[in-house]
Amino acid sequence: MPIQLSLIRELKTILEEDYNLNLSMEETTEIAVRLLGFVETLIKIESKATSQSEGKESVRQELKK
């Protein structure tokens, strides 16, 4: 998934102002891509966990009947 240039620039600014890191656009882009991958992985894990939890709840409901 491509990341908007404006978001990469915003990340670069945050890294400079908050963490005193003066990185190139290439380095900042690499960080942005890795962060995006990490967040996508977390979303997949949460989605799977929620799905499994809902499935277990459905089984519990059926057993109570």
Image (spheres, helix red, strand yellow):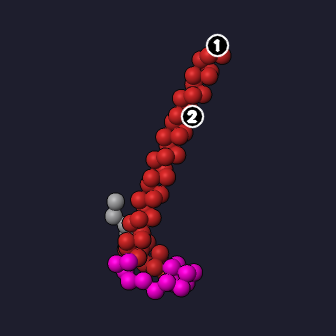
Q: Is residue 6 visible?
A: no
Magenta span dominant secondary structure? helix
Quadrant assignment for the C terminus: top right
Q: Is residue 6 left or right of residue 17?
A: left
Residue under label 2: 53
| Point 41% across, 59% down: residue | 37
Q: Position of residue 58 (x, y in %)?
A: 57, 25
Image depth: mark 1 or mark 2 in front: 2
Q: Circle 2 — which element?
A: helix
Magenta segment: 14-27
Q: Position of residue 28 (x, y in %)?
A: 41, 76
Residue under label 1: 65
Q: Circle 1 — which element?
A: loop
Q: Residues within 10 Å of mark 1 (few under 14, many from 20)?
A: few
Q: Position of residue 60 (x, y in %)?
A: 62, 22
Q: Is residue 57 left or right of residue 31?
A: right
Q: Position of residue 53 (x, y in %)?
A: 57, 34
Q: In the drawing, what numbered circle is on residue 12?
A: none
Q: CA distance from mark 1 to mark 2?
A: 19 Å
Q: Is residue 61 left or right of residue 36?
A: right
- Which quarter of the figure has residue 24? bottom left
Q: Is 55 drawn above or below residue 47 in the view shown?
A: above
Q: Amino acid at mark 1?
A: Lys
